[in-house]
Image: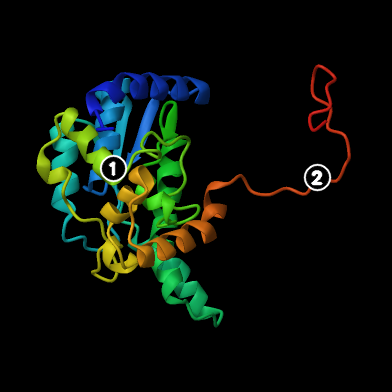
Amino acid sequence: MEFNAKEQLPGLIDWMRQQMKNCGGRTAVVGISGGKDSSVIAALCVEAYGRDNVVGVLMPNGIQPDIDYSNGLVEFLGIKHYVFNIQDGTNGILNEMDRVGIEASRQTKINLPSRMRMATLYAIAQSVDGGIVINTSNLSEDWVGYCTIYGDSAGAFSPIGMYTTEEVIAIGAELGLPERFLVKPPSDGLTGLTDEDNLGFTYHAVNEYIRKGIVDPEIKEQIDHKHRISRFKFETIPVYHNGLPIVIEDGTDFYK
Protein backbone atom coordinates (compact mmCIF):
# COMPACT_ATOMS: atom_id res chain seq x y z
CA MET A 1 0.00 0.00 0.00
CA GLU A 2 1.42 3.36 -1.07
CA PHE A 3 1.93 5.87 1.72
CA ASN A 4 -0.35 8.90 1.48
CA ALA A 5 0.91 11.76 3.65
CA LYS A 6 -2.12 13.95 2.93
CA GLU A 7 -4.48 11.31 4.31
CA GLN A 8 -2.31 10.82 7.41
CA LEU A 9 -2.14 14.46 8.46
CA PRO A 10 -5.67 15.15 9.82
CA GLY A 11 -5.56 12.20 12.23
CA LEU A 12 -1.99 12.97 13.28
CA ILE A 13 -2.74 16.64 13.96
CA ASP A 14 -5.85 15.77 15.98
CA TRP A 15 -3.83 13.25 18.00
CA MET A 16 -1.13 15.85 18.71
CA ARG A 17 -3.72 18.32 19.96
CA GLN A 18 -5.24 15.70 22.23
CA GLN A 19 -1.84 14.70 23.60
CA MET A 20 -0.99 18.31 24.40
CA LYS A 21 -4.33 18.64 26.19
CA ASN A 22 -3.66 15.43 28.12
CA CYS A 23 -0.32 16.90 29.27
CA GLY A 24 -1.96 20.11 30.41
CA GLY A 25 0.39 22.05 28.14
CA ARG A 26 0.12 24.68 25.45
CA THR A 27 3.65 25.38 24.17
CA ALA A 28 5.58 22.82 22.12
CA VAL A 29 9.32 22.87 22.86
CA VAL A 30 11.34 21.29 20.04
CA GLY A 31 15.07 20.68 19.69
CA ILE A 32 16.06 21.88 16.22
CA SER A 33 18.94 20.11 14.48
CA GLY A 34 18.07 21.20 10.95
CA GLY A 35 17.48 17.59 9.89
CA LYS A 36 14.24 16.10 8.60
CA ASP A 37 12.89 14.82 11.92
CA SER A 38 13.12 18.02 13.96
CA SER A 39 12.08 20.06 10.92
CA VAL A 40 8.96 17.98 10.35
CA ILE A 41 8.10 17.95 14.06
CA ALA A 42 8.43 21.75 14.24
CA ALA A 43 6.22 22.13 11.15
CA LEU A 44 3.65 19.72 12.60
CA CYS A 45 3.62 21.68 15.86
CA VAL A 46 3.02 24.92 13.98
CA GLU A 47 0.11 23.23 12.19
CA ALA A 48 -1.30 21.75 15.40
CA TYR A 49 -0.76 24.57 17.90
CA GLY A 50 0.02 27.70 15.90
CA ARG A 51 3.47 29.26 15.50
CA ASP A 52 3.03 31.42 18.61
CA ASN A 53 2.88 28.23 20.68
CA VAL A 54 6.07 26.64 19.35
CA VAL A 55 9.57 27.25 20.69
CA GLY A 56 12.58 25.95 18.80
CA VAL A 57 15.85 25.33 20.60
CA LEU A 58 19.16 25.16 18.74
CA MET A 59 21.83 23.36 20.76
CA PRO A 60 25.28 23.31 19.16
CA ASN A 61 28.05 21.54 21.04
CA GLY A 62 30.73 24.14 20.44
CA ILE A 63 30.94 25.00 16.75
CA GLN A 64 28.30 23.33 14.57
CA PRO A 65 29.25 23.64 10.89
CA ASP A 66 25.73 22.89 9.62
CA ILE A 67 23.81 25.16 12.02
CA ASP A 68 22.63 27.20 9.03
CA TYR A 69 20.04 24.46 8.45
CA SER A 70 18.63 25.03 11.94
CA ASN A 71 18.65 28.81 11.57
CA GLY A 72 16.98 28.50 8.19
CA LEU A 73 14.26 26.21 9.53
CA VAL A 74 13.17 28.47 12.41
CA GLU A 75 13.26 31.47 10.07
CA PHE A 76 11.16 29.64 7.48
CA LEU A 77 8.55 28.62 10.09
CA GLY A 78 8.65 31.99 11.84
CA ILE A 79 8.84 30.49 15.32
CA LYS A 80 10.41 31.85 18.48
CA HIS A 81 13.75 30.21 19.11
CA TYR A 82 16.80 30.18 21.37
CA VAL A 83 20.40 29.13 20.81
CA PHE A 84 21.94 27.25 23.75
CA ASN A 85 25.53 26.09 23.38
CA ILE A 86 25.82 22.89 25.42
CA GLN A 87 29.62 22.65 25.21
CA ASP A 88 30.33 24.06 28.69
CA GLY A 89 27.80 21.74 30.30
CA THR A 90 29.09 18.70 28.44
CA ASN A 91 32.72 19.53 29.18
CA GLY A 92 31.85 20.20 32.81
CA ILE A 93 30.76 16.60 33.28
CA LEU A 94 33.70 15.20 31.31
CA ASN A 95 36.13 17.35 33.30
CA GLU A 96 34.64 16.13 36.59
CA MET A 97 34.97 12.52 35.40
CA ASP A 98 38.61 13.19 34.63
CA ARG A 99 39.10 14.86 38.03
CA VAL A 100 37.83 11.81 39.93
CA GLY A 101 39.81 9.41 37.76
CA ILE A 102 37.08 8.00 35.48
CA GLU A 103 38.11 7.80 31.85
CA ALA A 104 35.13 8.70 29.69
CA SER A 105 34.47 6.00 27.10
CA ARG A 106 33.81 6.74 23.45
CA GLN A 107 30.16 5.86 24.00
CA THR A 108 29.94 8.31 26.89
CA LYS A 109 31.31 11.08 24.70
CA ILE A 110 28.79 10.24 21.96
CA ASN A 111 25.73 9.95 24.21
CA LEU A 112 26.42 12.76 26.68
CA PRO A 113 25.64 15.66 24.29
CA SER A 114 22.25 14.09 23.50
CA ARG A 115 21.42 13.89 27.21
CA MET A 116 22.63 17.45 27.77
CA ARG A 117 20.34 18.60 24.97
CA MET A 118 17.35 16.86 26.51
CA ALA A 119 18.14 18.34 29.94
CA THR A 120 18.25 21.75 28.26
CA LEU A 121 14.90 21.21 26.55
CA TYR A 122 13.25 20.24 29.84
CA ALA A 123 14.81 23.22 31.63
CA ILE A 124 13.28 25.51 29.01
CA ALA A 125 9.94 23.67 28.87
CA GLN A 126 9.51 24.00 32.63
CA SER A 127 10.28 27.71 32.45
CA VAL A 128 7.90 28.79 29.65
CA ASP A 129 4.12 28.93 29.81
CA GLY A 130 2.76 25.39 29.45
CA GLY A 131 5.98 24.07 27.93
CA ILE A 132 5.98 20.44 26.75
CA VAL A 133 8.98 18.70 25.15
CA ILE A 134 8.05 16.96 21.91
CA ASN A 135 10.01 13.84 20.90
CA THR A 136 11.52 13.92 17.39
CA SER A 137 12.45 10.25 16.82
CA ASN A 138 11.19 8.21 13.86
CA LEU A 139 10.32 4.53 13.50
CA SER A 140 13.37 3.58 11.42
CA GLU A 141 15.83 4.86 14.03
CA ASP A 142 13.84 3.54 16.95
CA TRP A 143 13.48 0.10 15.37
CA VAL A 144 17.22 -0.49 15.51
CA GLY A 145 17.73 1.42 18.75
CA TYR A 146 19.64 4.26 17.12
CA CYS A 147 18.83 6.74 19.84
CA THR A 148 20.09 7.68 23.29
CA ILE A 149 18.00 6.63 26.27
CA TYR A 150 17.10 9.74 28.30
CA GLY A 151 18.46 11.73 25.37
CA ASP A 152 16.74 11.98 22.01
CA SER A 153 14.46 9.07 22.95
CA ALA A 154 12.76 11.27 25.57
CA GLY A 155 9.81 13.64 25.34
CA ALA A 156 6.16 13.83 26.39
CA PHE A 157 4.90 12.17 23.21
CA SER A 158 6.20 11.10 19.81
CA PRO A 159 4.27 12.27 16.72
CA ILE A 160 6.49 10.54 14.13
CA GLY A 161 7.58 7.54 16.17
CA MET A 162 5.55 5.19 13.95
CA TYR A 163 6.65 6.68 10.61
CA THR A 164 9.71 5.53 8.65
CA THR A 165 12.33 7.99 7.44
CA GLU A 166 10.81 8.02 3.96
CA GLU A 167 7.32 8.62 5.35
CA VAL A 168 8.61 11.48 7.50
CA ILE A 169 10.05 13.11 4.36
CA ALA A 170 6.68 12.71 2.61
CA ILE A 171 4.88 14.34 5.55
CA GLY A 172 7.36 17.23 5.50
CA ALA A 173 6.82 17.73 1.78
CA GLU A 174 3.05 17.73 2.31
CA LEU A 175 3.50 20.41 4.97
CA GLY A 176 5.40 22.53 2.44
CA LEU A 177 8.89 22.26 3.90
CA PRO A 178 11.68 23.06 1.41
CA GLU A 179 13.66 20.04 0.26
CA ARG A 180 16.88 21.17 1.96
CA PHE A 181 15.33 20.47 5.37
CA LEU A 182 14.29 16.97 4.34
CA VAL A 183 17.38 15.51 2.67
CA LYS A 184 20.20 16.40 5.10
CA PRO A 185 21.87 13.08 6.08
CA PRO A 186 21.60 12.52 9.85
CA SER A 187 24.91 12.20 11.69
CA ASP A 188 26.11 11.66 15.24
CA GLY A 189 27.72 15.11 15.32
CA LEU A 190 30.98 13.75 16.75
CA THR A 191 32.73 11.34 14.43
CA GLY A 192 31.81 12.94 11.11
CA LEU A 193 29.97 9.76 10.16
CA THR A 194 26.32 9.52 9.17
CA ASP A 195 23.86 7.35 11.08
CA GLU A 196 23.92 4.85 8.24
CA ASP A 197 27.73 4.72 8.30
CA ASN A 198 27.58 3.80 11.97
CA LEU A 199 24.78 1.28 11.54
CA GLY A 200 26.34 -0.53 8.61
CA PHE A 201 23.14 -0.54 6.55
CA THR A 202 20.70 2.01 5.14
CA TYR A 203 17.44 3.20 6.61
CA HIS A 204 15.86 2.26 3.29
CA ALA A 205 16.77 -1.35 4.05
CA VAL A 206 15.12 -1.02 7.47
CA ASN A 207 12.04 0.54 5.91
CA GLU A 208 11.67 -2.18 3.29
CA TYR A 209 11.93 -4.78 6.04
CA ILE A 210 9.41 -3.04 8.33
CA ARG A 211 6.76 -2.26 5.74
CA LYS A 212 7.21 -5.03 3.15
CA GLY A 213 9.17 -7.80 4.83
CA ILE A 214 11.80 -7.51 2.11
CA VAL A 215 15.38 -7.74 3.37
CA ASP A 216 18.76 -9.26 2.61
CA PRO A 217 19.32 -12.20 5.03
CA GLU A 218 22.61 -10.78 6.34
CA ILE A 219 21.10 -7.36 6.96
CA LYS A 220 18.04 -8.98 8.52
CA GLU A 221 20.25 -10.61 11.12
CA GLN A 222 21.85 -7.27 11.99
CA ILE A 223 18.52 -5.44 12.15
CA ASP A 224 16.90 -8.14 14.28
CA HIS A 225 19.83 -8.14 16.69
CA LYS A 226 19.83 -4.36 17.10
CA HIS A 227 16.06 -4.36 17.51
CA ARG A 228 16.13 -7.09 20.13
CA ILE A 229 18.82 -5.57 22.36
CA SER A 230 17.40 -2.02 22.26
CA ARG A 231 13.78 -2.64 23.34
CA PHE A 232 14.53 -1.56 26.90
CA LYS A 233 14.94 2.01 25.64
CA PHE A 234 11.24 2.22 24.81
CA GLU A 235 9.69 0.49 27.79
CA THR A 236 8.57 1.94 31.09
CA ILE A 237 11.27 1.35 33.68
CA PRO A 238 10.69 -2.08 35.26
CA VAL A 239 9.36 -1.91 38.81
CA TYR A 240 9.38 -4.80 41.28
CA HIS A 241 5.82 -5.62 42.32
CA ASN A 242 6.10 -6.64 45.97
CA GLY A 243 2.48 -7.64 46.53
CA LEU A 244 1.74 -4.74 48.89
CA PRO A 245 -1.54 -2.92 48.20
CA ILE A 246 -1.75 0.49 46.54
CA VAL A 247 -5.24 1.84 47.13
CA ILE A 248 -6.34 4.74 44.94
CA GLU A 249 -9.07 7.26 45.68
CA ASP A 250 -12.10 5.10 44.87
CA GLY A 251 -10.76 2.23 46.98
CA THR A 252 -9.68 0.05 44.08
CA ASP A 253 -6.48 -1.94 44.42
CA PHE A 254 -4.38 -0.31 41.70
CA TYR A 255 -2.41 -3.45 40.81
CA LYS A 256 -5.11 -6.04 41.40
- What kind of residue is marked 1? Ser
Secondary element at tag 2:
loop
Q: Quadrant of residue 75?
A: top left
The residue identified by callout 2 is 241
Q: Alpha-carbon neighbours of circle 1 within 10 Å: few (<14), some, or many (≥20)?
A: many
Which residue is depicted at the point 14% across and 29% down?
176
Q: How is the protein colored in the picture? A: rainbow
- Is 75 left or right of 150, judged from the image as shown? left
Q: Is residue 104 visible?
A: yes
Q: Quadrant of residue 191?
A: bottom left
Secondary element at tag 1:
helix
Q: Alpha-carbon neighbours of circle 2 within 10 Å: few (<14), some, or many (≥20)?
A: few
Q: Is residue 127 visible?
A: no
The residue identified by callout 1 is 38
- Is 144 left or right of 9, judged from the image as shown? right
Give 110 or 180, whichever is nearer the viewer. Answer: 180
125, above or below 45, in the image: below
Q: Where is residue 205 drawn, in percent x and y? A: 29, 55
Q: Where is residue 26 drawn, in percent x and y? A: 41, 23
Which residue is depicted at the point 28% across and 38% down?
56
Outermost residue, right side: 244
Q: Quadrant of residue 6?
A: top left
97, above or below 156, in the image: below
183, above or below 23, in the image: below
- What kind of residue is marked 2? His
> Which badge, 2 or 1, comes first in the chain's sequence?
1
